[in-house]
Image (cartoon, rainbow, N blue to C red):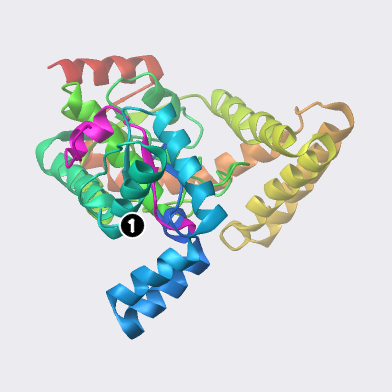
Amino acid sequence: MRDNSSDYRSLFLNATPMMDARAPVEFHKGAFPGVVNLPLMDDLERQKVGTCYKQHGQQAAIELGHQLVSGPLKAERIEAWAAFARANPEGYLYCFRGGLRSQIVQQWLKSEAGIDYPRVIGGYKAMRSFLLETTEQALQQCDFILVGGMTGTGKTEVLAALSNSLDLEGHANHRGSSFGKRATGQPAQIDFENALAIDILKKRGVGLEQFVLEDEGRIIGKCSLPLELYQSMQAFHLVWLEDSLANRVERILKDYVIDLSGEFIALLGEAEGFKVYAERLQQSLANILKRLGGERYQRMAAIMDQALLEQQSSGKVDSHRGWIEALLVEYYDPMYGFQRENKAGRIEFVGEQAAVLEFLRQRAAS
């Protein structure tokens, strides 16, 4: 039998298959990428056992747990664990603290299915602490630089072209602006933090000690940047990415019209997908009504509504350029221009995409 493990670094670096024996409610609050939830107890069973533990102690709680998970239900759960173990012979199982629940799963797998399967010592809590420390250590030990620039300059494209980038918006599954919400939703806050830490760990594992991030606010959709990271970002140096207004309009058109409508249609079908996409676009504009002011909002909303009608009837997206350009010039550009002035002392380089990429690659190599 393989030994139980507390080598969290190796588990994450190797993307080791892991089976999470916690209850679904615990799993959905926070988990690790690719992990499979195969609980010892469901949410109601866990609640009953927890109440029993508080009122009558551990032994009574264990006995109740065995009563609740018995007979065909027990056999069904053991078969699910055994199937995972057979499919992932190099994997591990864990519970919250690596204690009673994972030990019971281990024992039942051995006695009922004849499978020796190791667990993670310390469980979810220890692995989560390890990942929080991974991010904190990187902030203390590594060099970071930010990519800033007006909306639509292609900051995400720059990150995608670099091996030492950390794509915060990618991990948050959100494009970062008022219009950035995607069709497929966002991860839980803890899942976002865990995925980011594992990304850092893997990049440091291959020797990278300098990272490039997009200059972000504290919140990306509903995901918050780890506080220490956000605070550190206020002092990092920047490169400032530039591009023409025409190119920026085309990039926004692709992201927020062509790609977003495609996401919703793929998810919900043609009619429903387009309807929900159109409502999302209209709501995104309405969300910034106060900051736009009534007149500008009404003007841009009218252009957007007409563009959506045209897109729905003919598939053409040309008319969307009207509200996109107005939004960039009248709303986003003044806001980002003000930010650039405030950050001027930290800007190391200014240029278009090819020049910025060359600068960042040379900087990483020096």
Q: Is residue 147 left or right of residue 237?
A: right
Image quarter for residue 345? top left
- Residue occupying the point 17% across, 48% down: 133
Q: Is residue 100 left or right of residue 216?
A: left
Q: Say which quadrant the N terminus sits in.
A: top left
Q: Amino acid at mark 1?
A: Arg
Mark 1 falls on what kind of element?
helix
Name the residue nearer the viewer: 223 or 313: 223
Total number of numbered discs in the rendering: 1
Q: Is residue 97 above or below residue 351?
A: below
Is residue 339 shown to the viewer in this render?
A: no
Q: Which residue is mark 1?
A: 101
User: What x and y, as percent, mark residue 78?
Assistant: 46, 45
Q: Is residue 289 above or below residue 19?
A: below
Task: Bin the neighbour count of mark 1 within 10 Å (Cα to Cα): few under 14, some 14-19, many 20 and up.
Answer: many
Q: Find the magenta span and give its range.
A: 1-24
- Residue occupying the point 19% across, 39% down: 5
User: What x and y, as percent, mark residue 28?
Assistant: 47, 54
Q: Is residue 291 above or below residue 54?
A: above
Is residue 310 shown to the viewer in this render?
A: yes
Q: Is residue 207 left or right of residue 178?
A: left
Name the residue nearer the viewer: 218 or 17: 17
Q: Is residue 25 magenta?
A: no
Name the residue nearer the viewer: 262 or 108: 108
Q: Say which quadrant the C terminus sits in.
A: top left
Q: Is residue 359 above or below residue 58?
A: above
- Residue occupying the point 76% across, 28% down: 317
- Residue occupying the point 44% across, 24% down: 157
